[in-house]
Image (cartoon, grey):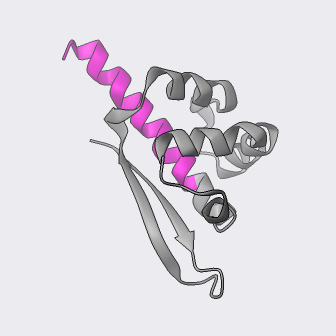
């Protein structure tokens, strides 16, 4: 089971995690998957530089996507997400989608 996580750092100490949001990957809604697929090429999820470029190209869609996955995420907290962490969160989302598709193929 894939889990998606997102670290939020303290405003006054950018090295210290204030909280971590987590979501069970199988709870992703079809609309969230569709939005993700419009931003990210899942075949390139292992390439951090490619993921960064995709994030740059779909930046305006990233915040609503993350708020769909983590409904409690505030605009202020979004500003305290490290870009490097975001790359790993996007990879987690991709892995969760792939896991979900594998379940569908197996007929579960």
- Where residue 34 sits, quadrant-wise, is top right
Q: What x and y, as percent, mark residue 38?
A: 67, 24
Q: Residue furthest bottom?
A: 13
Q: What x and y, as percent, mark residue 6?
A: 50, 58
Residue placed at 54% from the left, 83% from the top? Answer: 16
Q: What x and y, as percent, mark residue 91?
A: 53, 45
Q: Is residue 52 above or below residue 6?
A: above
Q: Is residue 8 above or below residue 32?
A: below
Residue 74 painted magenta: no
Residue range corresponding to the magenta coloring: 88-108
Q: Is residue 56 left or right of residue 45?
A: right
Q: Is residue 102 above or below residue 15?
A: above
Q: What x and y, as percent, mark residue 47?
A: 64, 46
Q: Is residue 97 left or right of residue 43?
A: left
Residue placed at 65% from the left, 68% from the top? Answer: 80
Q: Is residue 102 visible?
A: yes
């Amino acid at each position: 089971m894939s889990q998606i996580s997102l670290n939020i750092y303290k405003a006054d100490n950018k090295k210290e995690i204030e909280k971590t949001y987590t979501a069970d990957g199988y709870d992703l809604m079809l609309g969230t998957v569709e939005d993700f697929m419009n931003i990210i090429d899942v075949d390139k999820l292992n390439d951090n530089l490619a993921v960064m470029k995709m994030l740059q190209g779909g930046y305006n869609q990233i915040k609503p996507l993350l708020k769909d996955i983590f409904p409690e995420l505030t605009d202020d907290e979004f500003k305290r997400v490290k870009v490097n962490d975001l790359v790993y969160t996007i990879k987690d989302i991709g892995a969760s989608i792939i896991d979900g598709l594998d379940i569908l193929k197996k007929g579960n």
